[in-house]
Amino acid sequence: MSDASARKTMRFDKRWLLGVALAAAVVLFFAFDIGRLLNLQTLKDSQAELENWRAAQPLRAALIFFAAYVAVTALSVPGATVLTLAAGAIFGLGWGTVIVSFASSIGATLAFLASRWLLGSWVQERFGERLKTVNEGIAREGGFYLFTLRLVPVFPFFLINLAMGLTRIKVTTFYGVSQLGMLAATVLYVNAGTQLARIDSPSGIVSPGLLASLVLLGLLPLAARRVIDTLKARKVYARFVRPARFDRNLVVIGAGSAGLVTAYIAAAVRAKVTLVEKDAMGGDCLHTGCVPSKALIRSARLLSHVQRSAEFGIRSARADFDFAQVMERVQRVVQAIEPHDSVERYTGLGVEVALGEARLVSPWEVEILHHDGRTERLTTRAVVIAAGARPFVPPIPGIEQIEVLHSGNVWQLRERPERLLVMGGGPIGCELAQAFARLGCRVTQVEMDTRLLAREDADVSELVLRRFVAEGIDVRLGHEALRIEVVDREKTMVARHHGSEVRIAFDALLVAVGRQANLTGYGLQELGVAAGRTLTVNGFLQTNFPNIYAAGDVAGPYQFTHVAAHQAWYAAVNALFDPFKKFSADYRVIPWATFVEPEVARVGLNEQEARAQKVPHEVTVYPIEDLDRAIADSEAHGFVKVLTVPGKDRILGVTIVGEHAAELIAEYVLAMKQGIGLNKILGTIHIYPTMAEANKYAAGNWKRAHAPERLLHWVERFHAWRRG
């Protein structure tokens, strides 16, 4: 047995022992009917005797009473209310309050810790994805909500202790807030205990009026939070005059993926919405990102298959192509898709489209400089900023001497660069490096990190690297760009590698080292909208101005077209229906793909993230080289890697490397979103022969690793018995 397994077994044994001990204590409590000693009538009958005991041995009495109170509350058994009354009757209001306040908080914390130790890990492992929003809320404002619960005695004391133990609230926060939050109710009951003779039942202590007052007291923190939020909003709005009426329900700045979806949703619910775009409808995805890059990759892939003709039993094959014609095809693909995002289409959907530059004049006013020279100022209840992002060009010394290519302008190329230097080993850099290499460029790829696609697992990076090297790409890992030199029209990048300078000659430089949000040029700074690398937004996608929202690349945290569209729904609904209803954006199941060959797709955690976050996990791998369809297609490479909760079939994350990985991942995205485990995938019929069978076989590998060996042993004996 490994050390890790031994430690896990030891932890399980300790939990089991604690669970048994607590269960035994509770059973003994009820078996010996100890509860009869903790009822109001017994207390009243014994009051004089208890007072004499306290008078004769005050310190000992206080310590024994304190320990008994801690034990009752820690075990979550009935009796805390009567003991609180007893504290008032025996020790008086002052000392009774002190004893109960500390004893109840300590007992509650012990119950909290027992709940966390026995069930906390299991609950987080089993329902971690579903509890992600709860965990984030607890981390952000757990003390605030616990304080509210403690103030209201309507919520059962022991249930709060046990339930909070299953969350990730800090122990110190739980204890401190409990000590303070329970003080009001403690004083109330201890004071009642000083008048014990007048009490007929514990329920009589809290009248409907008093209970209502305590509920209102409990709601006070929530009301205070709302007041604080209102005051903050007033502060940011203080310099501006709110219009008496509005021309629009919503103005959307930017007609990329996020802006288009936001405007569409607003029009669909009959809101009056204006969509402003200063360049071209469709944004970066249509014109400089997803669409042109995939069109280029498709042409390059065809050429790669011609070069691999022998693998398909074809003696020889060749393809004559013109680089300029390939790039023209890319533009034709863009033009074919343009009508989907056109002014005419969105006007037909009920969106008012304004082609021009928008500028925020106030939180409720947007000034539009139309392309025809007109200036228009609109008042609006809400604004959604969907201004997107642009390629980042690092300030390398000497880079200003050359024309730099990037994902925004590379599509204008019509003459093929002989020597192309690609700077960046992320998804964009890798996609374009492979595509241009297949189109005949001598590609050198420079990356500061020690591997390509650093966000993926090391085995993914290795597979991609091997393919790149096999296709003739000169991959330079661990190279830091220092400067660009141009001497007699010869362009050179000087990079540092293992402490030495390396010189790399090139004809064209393609920079793909990331993108930066568009935060300037439309009034954000003048207005005072908070921003860092992206706009600062809360879970509802609100900026520090509650009526100004953001979605897409300008908001982060992901720069994917599908995430921008996902955020757009939340931004639109929240902007249009707040304060009546709003939703926190859900990022629990976000898939993405890198369209290199072999294709890489992922959803959820991978191994390196799970280790970094200390998330317990198991890894199941199915090698696609064993898949019949992959073999038939001469694409027998890659794998499906699934991370699951230890001992369970619940999926934590999936990485797929291979042919059509971006399509194959969809089954796992659905499974994670809907809480479907590997057993259900294994039980689903997949068409033979298809690449999708890889998902089923991965589930089968998991099942074999978790076969019930003891049961199978008895089944084997059963079959032997039947044979006679």
Image (cartoon, helix red, strand yellow):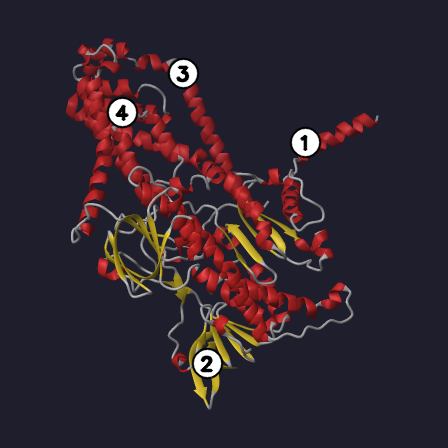
Counting residues from the start of the chain, the first of labels 3 and 4 encountered is 3
Neighbour tally class for label 1: few under 14, some 14-19, many 20 plus, Cα within 10 Å:
few
Q: Amino acid at mark 4?
A: Pro
Q: Quadrant of the N terminus?
A: top right
Residue in the picture at 47% in, 52% down = 562
Q: Residues within 10 Å of mark 2 (few under 14, many from 20)?
A: some
Look at discs 2 and 3 and give the one toward the viewer.
2
Indicate the secondary structure of the residue bearing disc 3: helix
Q: Residues within 10 Å of mark 3 (few under 14, many from 20)?
A: few
* Residue occupying image coordinates x 18% and y 47%: 234
Name the mark nearer the viewer: 3 or 4: 4
Residue 274 as seen in the image, left or right of residue 288: left
Closer to us: 601 or 74: 601
The three-letter amino acid code for the residue at tag 2 is: Val
Q: Upstream in the sequence, badge 3 or badge 1?
A: 3
**C-alpha separation, residue under disc 3 versus residue under disc 1:** 38 Å
Residue position marked by numbered label 3 in the rendering: 30
- Name above or below for residue 578 compared with residue 656: above
**Which residue in the protein does label 4 denote?**
153
**Total residue callouts:** 4
- Residue identifier under label 2: 494
